[in-house]
Image (tube, helix red, strand yellow):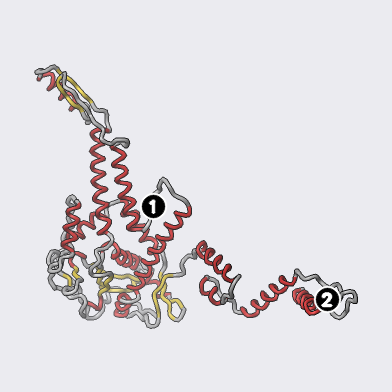
């Protein structure tokens, strides 16, 4: 049974990481060269710096395609209810904690490990809020730019650009209230996504400039050579007449605009570039494109394949979250007086993929035509409970199958005890068995 704590009650010997000089992210224009330098700084073996890469990542979150695709992947995990079971029985008190609003935010930060890489969370206290009548979790995300989990460092630094061992978070007493997730050398999938967001933004910028220059009617004016007064008046008139492009040239001068798009207009080139970048972002985050993008060519079967690939990522995310909750987070909860001995955190029963099970059943049915299949295997593979009177029901099914098999045998019009003198080749054993089966089911 869980132990509830009153508001404000703190664990003994609690230690917190403080006095970190947190700075605002760099919001300057990003380019491919910035991306390459950030990766090089991250991989520096003597003084690894994560600042440049994480500032770039923070800027990536403002992209609409990233927000949509990551939100979809994240919701597939957040929308599932967590339960804690011990000996097959659900502990409702701990379940309230696992499904509290604070816990939802906690899991969301754990999932961002997939985007950013290594994540370090400090749990300050866990208590039951009697006013709100729900569990609360006070935790802090240690700024990723200050965390250095690489071998030889494994510390939190006060300054973001210097890997100094100011806080050794893997050693007690700090380690008693820390939850960490991810591989120390993992840069996260944002390292792949960043290049497509950069190219996409460049495409939008060029497209915007193209629309400004050629999206509105272009005005051309001519004046007599050496008539500067007329030229000045024409220029003033154009400045006061809207923002559309114009050109003032002497008479006799020629103006030629060349379309470099070939068979495709310049506007289509920008549109194609942006679409390709969006498709690449979807592939990296979701593992597919058809569940978010509408392509020119597609089919229901192909869509099912893409949906299955996305489902595999969702299942992997759930297992990742459970691996952290049942290890580091579980140990921290014990520090706050929760009894989790002999139990396990898991997701509530998930929706059954009946389409996949139908395909599996077709395969098993075909195999059963050739070789026997253990019934227990079927119960293990399909979400169907085995009945308590299984043996009785199984016997009745066998008799029905036997009856169906003997239906092709001609029925003897005489009783079991009577003999038909005209029947020379009669098989009384088969006929009598048939009649007994009929009487049984009658």
Residue 439 or residue 129, whichever sits in front: 439
Q: Give above or below for 220 relative to 277.
A: above
Q: Position of residue 269 (x, y in %)?
A: 29, 41
Outermost residue to the front: 424
Q: Position of residue 300 (x, y in %)?
A: 48, 52
Secondary element at image label 2? loop
Q: Is residue 215 left or right of residue 168?
A: right
Q: Which mark is residue 438?
A: none
Q: Residues within 10 Å of mark 2 (few under 14, many from 20)?
A: few
Outermost residue to the bottom: 341
Q: CA distance from mark 2 to mark 1?
A: 70 Å
Secondary element at image label 1? loop
Q: Residues within 10 Å of mark 1 (few under 14, many from 20)?
A: some
Q: Disc 1 designates what residue?
A: 292
Q: Give above or below for 178 relative to 246.
A: below
* Residues at marks 2 and 1 touching, judged by CB atoms closer than 8 Å: no
Q: Position of residue 399 (x, y in %)?
A: 70, 76
- The earlier-in-sequence mark between 2 and 1 is 1
Camera-side mark, 2 or 1: 2
Residue at image x 26%, y 65%? Answer: 117
Q: Which mark is residue 426?
A: 2
Q: Position of residue 113 (x, y in %)?
A: 28, 65
Q: Residue 233, located in which quarter of the rendered image? A: top left
Q: Is residue 279 left or right of residue 243?
A: right
* Placement of the N terminus among the 4 image quadrants: bottom left
Residue 247 or residue 261, whichever sits in front: 261
* Placement of the C terminus among the 4 image quadrants: bottom right
């Amino acid at each position: 049974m869980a132990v509830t704590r009153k508001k404000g009650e703190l664990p003994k010997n609690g230690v917190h990481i403080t006095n970190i000089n947190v700075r605002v992210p760099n919001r300057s224009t990003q380019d491919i060269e910035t991306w390459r330098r950030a990766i090089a700084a991250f991989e520096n073996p003597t003084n690894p710096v994560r600042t440049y890469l994480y500032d770039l990542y923070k800027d990536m979150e403002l992209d609409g395609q990233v927000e949509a695709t990551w939100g979809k992947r994240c919701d597939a995990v957040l929308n599932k209810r967590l339960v804690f079971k011990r000996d097959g029985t659900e502990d409702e008190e701990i379940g309230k904690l696992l499904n509290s609003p604070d816990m939802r935010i906690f899991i969301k930060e754990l999932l961002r490990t997939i985007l950013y890489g290594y994540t370090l969370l400090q749990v300050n206290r866990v208590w039951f809020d009697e006013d709100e009548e729900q569990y609360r979790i006070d935790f802090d995300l240690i700024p990723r730019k200050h965390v250095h989990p690489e071998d030889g460092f494994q510390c939190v630094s006060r300054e973001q650009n210097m890997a100094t061992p100011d806080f050794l978070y893997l050693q007690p007493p700090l380690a008693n209230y820390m939850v960490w997730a991810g591989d120390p050398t993992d840069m996260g999938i944002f390292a792949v996504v960043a290049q497509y967001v950069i190219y996409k933004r460049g495409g939008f910028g060029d497209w915007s400039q193209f629309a400004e220059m050629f999206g509105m009617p272009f005005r051309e004016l001519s004046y007599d050579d050496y008539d500067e007064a007329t030229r000045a008046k024409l220029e003033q008139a154009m400045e006061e007449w809207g923002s559309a492009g114009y050109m003032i040239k002497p008479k006799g001068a020629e103006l030629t605009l060349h379309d470099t798009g070939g068979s495709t207009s310049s506007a289509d080139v920008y549109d194609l570039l942006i679409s390709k970048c969006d498709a690449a972002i979807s592939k990296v985050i979701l593992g597919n494109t058809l569940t978010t993008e509408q392509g020119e060519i597609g089919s229901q079967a192909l869509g099912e394949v893409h949906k299955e690939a996305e489902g595999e990522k969702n299942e992997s995310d759930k297992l990742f979250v459970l691996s952290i909750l049942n290890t580091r987070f579980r140990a921290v909860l014990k520090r706050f007086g929760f009894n989790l001995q002999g139990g396990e955190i898991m997701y509530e029963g998930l929706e059954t993929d009946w389409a996949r099970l139908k395909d599996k059943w077709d395969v098993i049915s075909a195999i059963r035509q050739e070789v026997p299949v253990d019934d227990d295997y079927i119960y293990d593979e399909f979400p169907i409970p085995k009945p308590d009177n299984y043996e009785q029901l199984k016997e009745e099914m066998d008799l029905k199958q036997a009856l169906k098999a003997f239906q092709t045998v001609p029925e003897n019009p005489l009783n079991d005890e009577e003999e038909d003198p005209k029947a020379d080749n009669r098989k009384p054993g088969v006929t009598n068995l048939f009649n007994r089966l009929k009487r049984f089911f009658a």
